[in-house]
Structures are given as structure tokens and as C-alpha cells.
Image (cartoon, rainbow, N blue to C red):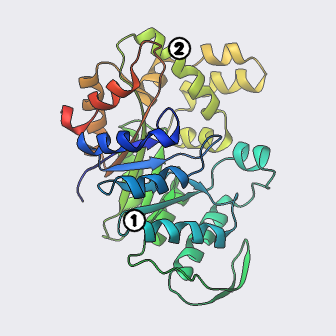
Amino acid sequence: MIRRNGMTVPLPGHLHDHKEKYAQLADWGYSDIWSAETDGADAFTPLALAAAWEPRLRLGTAIVPAYTRTAPVIAQSVAALADAAPGRFAIGIGSSSNVIVERWNGVPFVDPYKKVRDVVRFLHDAFSGEKVSKEYDTFKVDGFRLSIKPSQKPTILIAALREGMLKLGAREADGVIINWLSAQDVTKVAKVVSDAANGIEKEITARIFVCPSEDTEVVRAGARFAIAAYMNVPVYADFHRWMGRAPLMQGMWDAWKAGDRKAALAAIPDQVVDELVVHGSPAHCRDIISEYFKNGVTTSSIAILPLDPNLDYWKSVKALSPSAS
């Protein structure tokens, strides 16, 4: 499988100003853009614009939460984008987190494995073109038929942290999307995917957090806020326990649980920051990103963290690009 170099979108600024920026990404050798959906733009709109503006880019969602739209609505959005960008759209589906699903959207965050599995199975059923009347474990569909049939079925990827979702992505989808892990962690994750795939090559897309700055202390201080915000969410805490980081992160978890945010930040070791956030000179960052690929990643989605106030975002995008290698 060829190496695919992606960038996380939306880019900074207004969406209507991104046409030339998408073209520049392609000029610099980026092959993909991957949308993030948390509290800003939805997952589909930035990609719909790119579908019309820049035919050289593959488009992917990383991720669409399985809970916050009904399965037929997800299928309609996927079908529309796959029809707009034939052969160059990948739908990434994941459970998201209890914070986004339950606290922000008021949807019970229950049975995440089953929910993601059922949405993926429904997408396979819907893209058959047949009428779907089926009771899945977590929802029921009665008589839905997808009237748009793209010329090429989109790639389906599952956002995965631990073994259950990783195996699900290997067995029932075209691969997985991974997040908040080190280059060394990829080895363990990729082996689970490979073993479950029974010899079938699967895509492994990784969101990689990068700050190409040599102001180490400034970067580490800013990165601690991002790490604390994510790693105290139960799904990420459980992931890093599985990865063996509990001894390094327990102090942060204990302080956070006690309500002492300042102590929680201080308890995050430099080692954890340096493993989870790629930083240093652009050349060093490119070397570390290459390690992700060597250890099993097939597609990157670089997310530039503006942790250094002196960082020029767009120069950083160019400095990290394949054309700079």
C-alpha cells in the first residue's frame, strides 16, 4: 500500500477562503485531507468544498460519530460525497467520546462497540442498493433504500483505540483510524489489525499531532493542556492503560479526579508529551512522522498544534510536506 500524506481540516480561517489553500496542499505533495468534527465545522462541509475545488485530493472524515446522526442520514451524506468525488472519499466512523456524545449532544453513550459495528454494517447494507428492513442490535431500519448509488463504493474506516475496535475495522471495514499515540505505539496497534485481517491489506490512518517548533518548553507547556483534555476522557485513559502508560499518567488522572487541574498538568511527564506530540525542527518532525509509517501507518493526517505563538501555520504546513523532504 502506498504512503498517503494527509492534512487535517478545516484549515484556520474561513471555509470560503480555502480554495487556493487546498490547491497548494496538492502542489506540495499532500494526497489527502481529513476532516475533524468536534465543536467547529461538521465533518462533511469542508470536504464537499474540496470535492468541487481540488480533484487531486482524497477526502476523508476522521471522524463522524456513530451516535449524533441516524444511520440513514450518515448513509445519505456518505453517498452524496462519494458521488461528488468518485473513488476518492473515505468515511471514517467512530464512537467519539462520552463528552461529545452525551454531554454536548444529549445522546446516551452506551454500547459504543455495538453502535459503531451496527452503523458500519448498515452502510454496507445500504450501499448494496437494496431496500433495508433490518433490526440491528442498537437500532432498527424499516424500508430504507438509498436512492443515490455512487459509481464507486467509498472506503469505510473505523476509528479504533483498543483491540475490539481495531479487530472490527480489520474484519468488517477497509481499515482503521488511530489517534493520540506515539510512533512506537503503532507497532502494537498495527499487529492487532494485521492479525485480524487474515492476510488482507488494510488501511491504517493516523492523526498525528505536530508542532514544528524548537521552543521546547513552550511547546510542552501548551501540549500538556491538550493531553489533559483528552487523556482524562475514559476511552483515551483506557487506551493508554492498554498501551502501558498508566505508571506515567496515574498522577495526572488522580489529580484531575480530585479537581486539581493545575496539579494534573504538572503531573504529566515530559516523556508523555514528547511521545504523543511531535515537536522540534521541521526536519526532526518529518523524521518522526516517517517512523509512524515505518511502524505500520499507511496514511497520515497531520494536525498542526499552534502551541508556539511565533509559529507560522502555513509555513509549517509547507515545511512538513512531502515536497520538503
Whether residue 10 is visible here, answered yes or no, is: no
Residue highlighted by disc 2: 221
Residue 61 % position (x, y): 49, 54
Whether residue 256 is visible here, answered yes or no, is: yes
The C terminus lies in quadrant: top left
Q: What residue type is labelled 2?
A: Ala
Residue 126 % position (x, y): 56, 80
Nearest the viewer among 39 and 140 is 39
Residue at the image position 30 percent from the left and 36 percent from the top: 289
- Horizontally, is 320 left or right of 166 in the view? left
Q: Is mark 2 on a helix, strand or loop?
A: helix
| Residue 290 sits in quarter | top left
Residue highlighted by disc 1: 85
Residue 174 % position (x, y): 41, 67
The N terminus lies in quadrant: bottom left
| Residue 232 sits in quarter | top right
Which mark sits nearer the N-terminus, 2 or 1?
1
Residue at the image position 44 percent from the left and 49 percent from the top: 34
- Horizontally, is 81 left or right of 191 in the view? right
Tell us which disc is closer to us: 2 or 1: 1
The circle drawn on residue 142 is none
Q: What residue type is labelled 1?
A: Ala
| Residue 199 sits in quarter | bottom left
- Horizontally, is 140 left or right of 202 in the view? right
Position above or below: 138 against 157: below
Residue 71 % position (x, y): 65, 70
Estimate the spatial distance between the alpha carbons at disc 2 and disc 1, rounded to whole Å. 41 Å
Nearest the viewer among 198 and 2 is 2
